[in-house]
Image: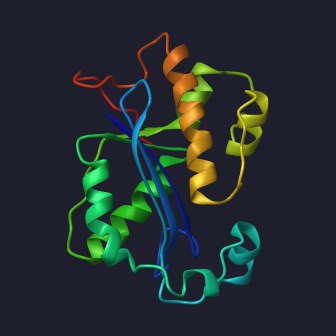
Amino acid sequence: MYCIVDVETTGGVKGPTRLTEIAIFRHDGLQVVDSFHSLVNPECPIPPFIRHLTGISDEMVQEAPLFADIAEQVLTITRDAVFVAHNVGFDFNFIKKELEWLGYDYFRRTLCTVRTSRKVFPGFPSYSLGKLCNSLSIPLNNRHRAQGDAAATVRLFEMLLQHDAHGLIPRSGGASLAIHD
């Protein structure tokens, strides 16, 4: 099992920054079998740069659940799955930080679609999600929103699975080594 994840936040991983949106697609290696999406009330103002980038405003998250309210769903949908994200260190460490603030230890095998794409599809001028999706003709709707970016990452992940001639992606049930960011 795999969970393709994307988050939107109030800033970088370090410090008191918080989640504003999360999308998770649980994938069995063939197709998406479950999903979870939510705006998240960060309990702090969203900086203007982030508001402009994501389109997520303070008003949009005002009535959204706190991360504490959705933590159990995040833990459940990602359980026994490889945590997959485009620049996995950011998304994984952000969720790990939010969960640690609630007293949870969070450990998952991880796979970075940026690093894996560089190996499976060498030679592209950029491996940013937008440019890579353009190079591979993957539709990317709702850019810089968790659900849109995660859905495009699902398509990218499926292409990586199809073209993974060197066994870079750990297969379900196997003892393969995960690629870490």
Between 14 and 96, which is closer to the camera in this rendering? 96
Residue 115 is at least partly visible in this image: yes
Q: Where residue 90 sits in the image (x, y, percent)?
A: 50, 57
* Residue pictured at 34% horizontal, 32% vertical: 178
* Residue pictured at 58% horizontal, 23% vertical: 159
Q: Residue furthest top?
A: 165
Q: Where residue 101 sits in the image (x, y, percent)?
A: 29, 77
Between 170 and 6, which is closer to the camera in this rendering? 6
Colour approach in the figure: rainbow
Q: Where residue 117 sits in the image (x, y, percent)?
A: 59, 29
> Which image quadrant for residue 144?
bottom right
Q: Where residue 89 sits in the image (x, y, percent)?
A: 46, 52
Q: Is residue 113 above or below residue 120?
A: below
How many labels sit on residues?
Answer: 0
Residue 126 is at least partly visible in this image: no
Horizontal side, residue 79 vs residue 22: left or right: left
Between 152 and 123, which is closer to the camera in this rendering? 152
Image quadrant occupied by the N terminus? top left
* Residue pictured at 64% horizontal, 60% vertical: 145
Horizontal side, residue 67 vs residue 132: left or right: left
* Residue pictured at 71% horizontal, 33% vertical: 138
Horizontal side, residue 112 vs residue 51: left or right: left
Q: Is residue 122 above or below residue 93?
A: above
